[in-house]
Structures are given as structure tokens and as C-alpha cells.
Image (cartoon, rainbow, N blue to C red):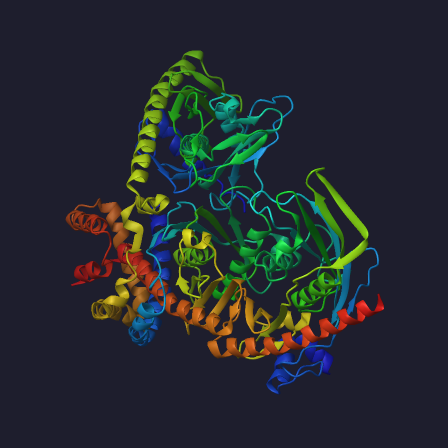
Amino acid sequence: MATDHKTLQPLEFYKTFLDRKSRPDGRNLLEFRKVTVNAGSIGTADGSAIVKCGNTTVICGIKAEIAAPGMDEPSKGFIIPNVTLPPLCSSKIKSGPPGEAAQSATQFIAELVANNIILDLHNLCIHSTKWAWVLHCDLVCINLDGSLLDACVIALITALKNVTLPIVTYDEELDKLICDTDQKRPLEGIKQPVTSTFSLFENGILISDPTSEEEQLAAGLTSITMEGALVTHMYKPGGCTLDEKQVKKLIQQSELKAKEIVRLIEEVCLSSIAER
Amino acid sequence: MVTNFACLQTTLHNFVLFFTITFLVQFKTHSYLCFIKILKSSVTLFTMETEQKSIRALKCEQSVLSRADGSVMFSQGNTVVMASVYGPLEAKIQKELSDRMYVEVNYKPKTGMPGVAERGKEKLIKTTCNHIILTNLHPRTAVCITIQEMQDGGTLLSASINAVCLALLDSGLPLQCLVAAVTCLVDKKDKIILDPCIRTVKEGYKAMFTFAFDSQKYNLILSHCEGQVPYQLFQEAMELCQKASHIIFDFYRQAVLRKFSKELL
Amino acid sequence: MKETPLSICEKQCVIQAVKEGQRVDGRSLAEQRKTCITFGTEWGCCQVLLGNTRVMAQVSCTIQVPKSSRANEGMLFINVEMSTMAAEHFEAGRLGQQGIEVNRLVERCIKDSRCIDLESLCILVEEQAWEIRVDIHVLNHEGNLIDAATLAALGALCHFRRPDVTLDGREVIVHQLDERDPVPLTILHYPLTLSFALFDQGKIYALDPTNLEERSADGKLVLGLNAYRELCTLQISGDGVFIRKEAVLSCANVAASRAVEMVEMLKKCLAADAAERIKGKYDGLVSSVALEAERITTQSQATAYFKTPVHNLEENADEESLSVPKTKLVKDQGIVTLETKSDVSSSESDIEMEPLPPASVVKKRVYEEIDIGNDSEEEPVMLITKELT
């Protein structure tokens, strides 16, 4: 009976739950799903992580390279994010060139990088105007069930914290790079932004960490990125409107979530260092 | 006979437009008085706290393009953007939606090919349009919105959203509300600058926000940020933009009044 | 979207008119539409209006490795962009047959006639040279895109300034625009294209065809000429159109004198732009928003709103009085429909009767509209209410 109702009138089905302040999967409106993080899962990468937020699973692998820095910013390195949504992650994704969802997720992460929210890019400089590190961050989603950006940001931060780079020095007289592969050291100055996605429904109901079903039924989505108590990004592309009270509530909620996630990432990183 | 028929069609078309507009006017007069109160109360705020007191001069020319159903050339300070709307059109089979209209948005940069950054802007504008256009009224059709950058004066995103809204008004597509976008910037001394010009943007900043509000309750409909600030400042910036959005709504009203006063009176 | 097909009667009307030496928009056969050239604040931004056809070109530059075959030359790249904005049958990101034709003709006229001195763009032989890129955006397609596109491209190239470079040993230093005065491109001659639509198997030709004329014509003759009356491009297209050599010569003569006039006009516009820039407070394309005063709305200084709220209230009161009759109309929908009918019949009768009695009224209104334009649109609403009372 319930499944019939769900297939015939999905929005009505959801609304009966939302009116009673609960959700079909048993969560409260502002409860987020269980987050599992594993660091250093890919041996061949310079840094990696797997993140599961409920069913949404994202793998992040980071490959480091050395290249000449850009002419306009000679003392900055590069972080090049790329979010891939292969057809295996969801029935709605088709094979072929990256779709809109993958492109906008890549653009979102690239904006965070450009605004120095992930890492101060000066830390990636080896020698100004000559050499700098390039970090290729590949984020592959292997199961897409809503809140993709949340999982991507956690995976990226954990993988960056997991990165170890060989010590490279530049000899100006010989115009040569000297690489010491025996000694490796982690990156410094990684910030800890945490993204929280919310779905908005027409009658002013807000739910956190939506599944893909909830994302589709919702009248709007918004992703808030917090670093500690700082609002680093509020991404709301159209959809249902929000008043000031709701914005405040969302920001408070994401601040709470950010605290817990940061603690989780720290624990994971400590344990992965201990394993090494 | 052909010309007569065309004439009849345009008058009818105008009348339908007039209808939606009077509706709008009627709706807005109600909220207008309270809006003046808001403006009055905000005077002190604008002179006391911020560097730039208001948004830069707005200017627009509607129906600039002869072929498009709705088009506008919009300038906000030195930023110039052109937007065109074609629709409702026959939708391509793979893009046809059975219950509503498909909204296609193309953002064209001035130099080079559109890249990932343009796709991001397209998505922001597309989802906003999906909300403001009454898409349910035209199922199995498409509307094609094109935005052309013409001159960068610092606030291209908010200018394009405003231009799209004016172009939609010009095309006469039924809308559920209007949208007005305002950009503001938090400089390195934590001062909020409303509607910054390109020089201010290039000088560097702590954060830059673009907010868009609807014309019904002035609620937040779109938000886009660069950089990070404490919540207090974020909220202040948002409130400031919200107040500034009234100027843009008022401008829309003037633009529409002007256009229809010519055609009807 | 497909292009709306052209009806036979429209086509025949155009052809018949041309045979009688007339054109649908009232021009003579050798007359061009009104041309208007404006420039943006950025260097190398030019907008051209040819009647209702609107094209914008933007020039940009980057440092690249020169081609090995021409190691001591810079590069010129021309790219035409057509999007749905210009016409419903254009698709963004994909040039159709028409787009490719325009792109190739602009290339032939500007690049292949070698009007830009590419050798002066070389910085270090075989290592570094400037690549000049011209992006031509077609904004509105009302016929004769080729002429508009070449004029816009040429205007943009003339207007463009590249950053200055100096050599420090083998190291290239690029000076930002505020550091050193930027350098204009070296332009050897000013080539333009002029198009003729061919009718009646090439016996009749009409300069600067509109979209309607282009679509009803048998073929097209495109001539590329510079201000020295020299031919640099010539193309005849169409299905089986033959044109007599005398006709080509007379076309070329008409085009040559037009080309001289147009180059002069372009130079005047460039000089005016330079003079404006020196004055300071230059706002580029913003002023071109005011091309046709009727359709423009301005809110010249929004700050005025906060300073004079009292005045504001008055204005709003006026607006309300204006909206009262309108709301009445909406309340009773039956009246509205009746009104439409009467409106339509009156407009129909206007056409049939020839505008004899309402002539004075029309004139008066036009006068008022011009008035608004001159008043820089401060209080459009007030004027309207005056008309009402």
C-alpha cells in the first residue's frame, strides 16, 4: 500500500511524513546521515580518501606533479579538482561527456579552491616563478544518493590531509631540482570547510542532507559551506525562496554539522598516521 | 490583409501583456506603501554604515533586438549585458518535459569559448528562471534565454540576472514573481561596499556576495559567494542587498510602465 | 528551432518591388541602411548596427609560440559566434552553413588581405609572438551579416591596444596597461565588404540586402574593397546565377565609393571615441544603450531616492492614480475584452482610412516622445499622467 502511494504520488507521500516532522528513512528533518571516512585507501596515489554519507560514496585520489607556475601568480601552486559521475553511480547518469551535475560540482570545488578556502596555494610553491606543485584531485562518485557536494568536500579535505610530498629543493646555480624521495612530509595549512546541503519544500519545511529522491521532489536546494564559525560559501541556485530566519537557522545547523565533521576528519587522519 | 492580421495579432499580444502587467501593478500597489516605509527607515543605514550608499545608475532599453520575443540591453554602472528570450518554442524531443516548459540558458562570454565558469553561471540563472517562470502553463515547450556579456563593470552575474528578468518581462511570458540581484563586497577592512565597480573588485576583497530576491516577500532566491566572513557580516551584507533590491524592483516597474505607456495610450 | 519559412507572396512582393526599382523599406537599390558604430570601455570592443542587424566584435591577445613556417610573424585568429540570440534557427556553439560562410568571408577580407602587419607582432623569432583573436558575436540577424561582421572586426582591430613588451636579454617583460601606454596594431589598409543581392538572374542588384531580401534573392555578390578603391575579395554565390561583367564593374564602382565613405566614418568614430576617453569618465557601451530614446528607461542616480523620500511619495501617488483605471479594467474582465475589440477595430480603420483625422494627434504624441528623450527620462511617469489628464 505504502509503495503504491509512493510511486503514484511521491510528493504527497513525502508531505505526509514531513507534516509529522519525520522522513521515510526514519530521520528527523534536520538529521544527517551516518558519515564514514577512510583515509589513505589508494596506495598508488599521493593522498586519498573514501567517504560515505549514507549511500552516497565518493573516492578522492590526489596525484602530485611539478610544473611552472602561472605568469600572473608566480608564487602559487595549483589544485585542479575534477568531479566525475560515471554511469555506475546512478541510473540517471548516462555515459559520455560530463553532464551538468558533474560540471557544476567541479565548478563548485574549483570556486572553493580559487577563494583560498581549501588551502593557501602559496604553500604549494617550491621556488617562486620557477617551480610549484600541481595537485590533481580526482573525485569519483561511485554511488550517488543526494548531497554530492557534502561528500566531495569531506573527501577532498581528508585526501589533502593524507597527502605526503617528497622534499624538493631548487638549486639556483645549477638550475636543477633536487628531489629527496626518502623523506616525505605532509601538506601544511589545510583549512577545514564543511559543506551541508539542505532541501527546501514549498511550505517552508527544511530538511538536511537529502537523498537523491528528496532532492528531486524538493522545490529548491541550498549548500552552505562553513569553516568553523565563518560563512565561506552559500550556494543557492534559484528554487524556493528563503527568509532571513530560515537562513539563520540553516547557518546555525551547518555550523553544528561542521564541528562534528571536523572532529571526525581529525580522528581519521590521526589513526591513518598511526598506521603508517 | 496580411498586415491587418499581423496588426490584430500584435494588439492582442499587447493586450495579454497589458493584462499581466496590470495584474502586477495591482499586486504591487498594495505592497508599495509598506515598501516606502522600509525605504524611509533605511535612509540612516545607507548613509552611516557603508562606503557606497546605493547602487549605480541603472539603464535599460527593451525590445532592442527585432527578432527575439523579448530582449533587453541593460546597464548597471559600467556593466553592460544583453539578454534575449525566445519562447515558448517547440522543444527538442530529448529535452521535452511532459509537465512543464524546458528552460535553456546560454551565457556567452565576450572572448573565447564558454567554459566551466560559464556553465556555473548558466546553472544559477537557469534554476532561478525555472522558479520565476510559470513553467507549468506551457508543457512540452521550451524557452531559450541567451545572455551576452558586453562590458565588464564588476558585477556581471547580478547584471545578467536582472537583464534576464527584464527580457522575460519584455517577452510577456507569464511569471510568478520578479527577481532582482545585487552584488556586494566586503573589503579587507570589513567594510561592506554595495554594487562595487571593477576597480574596487580588482583591488582585492575578503568576500563578494551576489544575492537575488523575489518581488513577493523579498525573500532570498539565489545566493552566490566568494570568500569567507563571520555570520554577522554575512547577515548585514544580505540585509543591505535586500534593501537595495527594492531600487531594482522599482526600476523594473518604471521600465514596464514606460514601455506600455507608449504602446497603449 | 527551424527558421520560419518565407511565404510565396512575401517573396514575390520583394521581387516585384525590386523590379520596379523600389525596396520594401523605402530605400533605393544602391542605398545602405543607417550604420552606427560604438566602442566599449575595454580596448578592442566594437559594436556595429546596420539597420537592425547588430554585431559586436571583441579583440584579445595572448603570447604564443609562432608557427614554424612563419617564425617571424604573429597570428590572427577570427572566430564568428552565432547564438539563438540572433535568430531562432541559430544554435549556440555550432556554426551552421551560414555561419561558416560569414566566418570564411571575414577571414578572406581581413586576414587574407594582410591588412594587419603581422611581423610587428613578433616578440622573439621562433619563440614568442602575439596571437590576436577576434571574436565576432552576431546579436541580431536582419540581413547582411557579412558586411556588419567585417566592419565590426575592422573597427575592433583599429580600436584595440595590446600591452607593451620589452626584452630583458631573452626574457620577455609584459607591461600592464596602467604601467605603460598600450600599443595599437599596425594597420596597412582598411578593407571592408559590401554585399549586393542579385535578382532576376543577376540583372538587378540591391546593396545591403535585409533578411527578407536575402532570402528572396537569386544570389549574392560580395565585394571586399579598401579605401584606396582596391578589390581584395570577390564572391558570387547562388544557384546558377550568371552576372554580366559590366554589372560586376558597376557594382564595384558603387561599392568602392561606399567603402571610402564608410572608412571615413569609421575613422571619425574612432577619433570621437579617443576624444571622449581623454575627457575621462568614459562609460563606453552604456551610452549606446541610448541609441533609440523611446524604449529606454533610466534611473539616473539611484541615490536621489534616499535623499528625497518626500518627492518620492508624490511620484508614487501619481503612479497610483495612473493605475486606478487599469485595476478597474482587470476587476471586470468583460469590459477588457470589449475594449480589445474596439481597439482592434480602430487600428484597422486607421490603416484603411489612411490616417487623416488622427494625424494631428499622432504628431503631437511623437513630439511628446521626443521631448521625453531630450529630458533624459527623469520622470517618464509624470509625462504619462499629463497625457491622461
Residue C57 in view of the camera: yes
Residue at (48% x, 25% y) in the render: C110
Residue B191's x, y, as percent?
A: 41, 65
Q: Is residue C63 above or below residue C219?
A: below
Residue B97's x, y, as percent?
A: 60, 61
The residue most toward the top is C246
> Which quarter shows the N terminus of chain A?
bottom right
> With B246 as the anchor, is A44 left or right in this view?
right
The residue most toward the front is A173
Which quadrant would residue C321 be assigned to in this image?
A: bottom left
Q: Nearer the viewer, residue C271 or C52?
A: C271
> With B117 as the anchor, is C27 left or right in this view?
left
Residue C210's x, y, as percent?
A: 40, 34
Residue A11's x, y, as percent?
A: 62, 76
> Tag count in the figure?
0
Q: Nearer the viewer, residue C191 or C322?
A: C191
> Which quarter shows the C terminus of chain A?
bottom right
Q: Is residue A259 above or below residue A167?
A: below
Which quadrant would residue A252 be assigned to in this image?
A: bottom right
> With B104 as the anchor, is A56 left or right in this view?
right
The residue most toward the bottom is A20
Residue at (65% x, 62% y) in the render: A189
Q: Is residue B30 above or below residue A162?
A: below
Q: Nearer the viewer, residue A4 or A192?
A: A192
Residue C333 in view of the camera: no
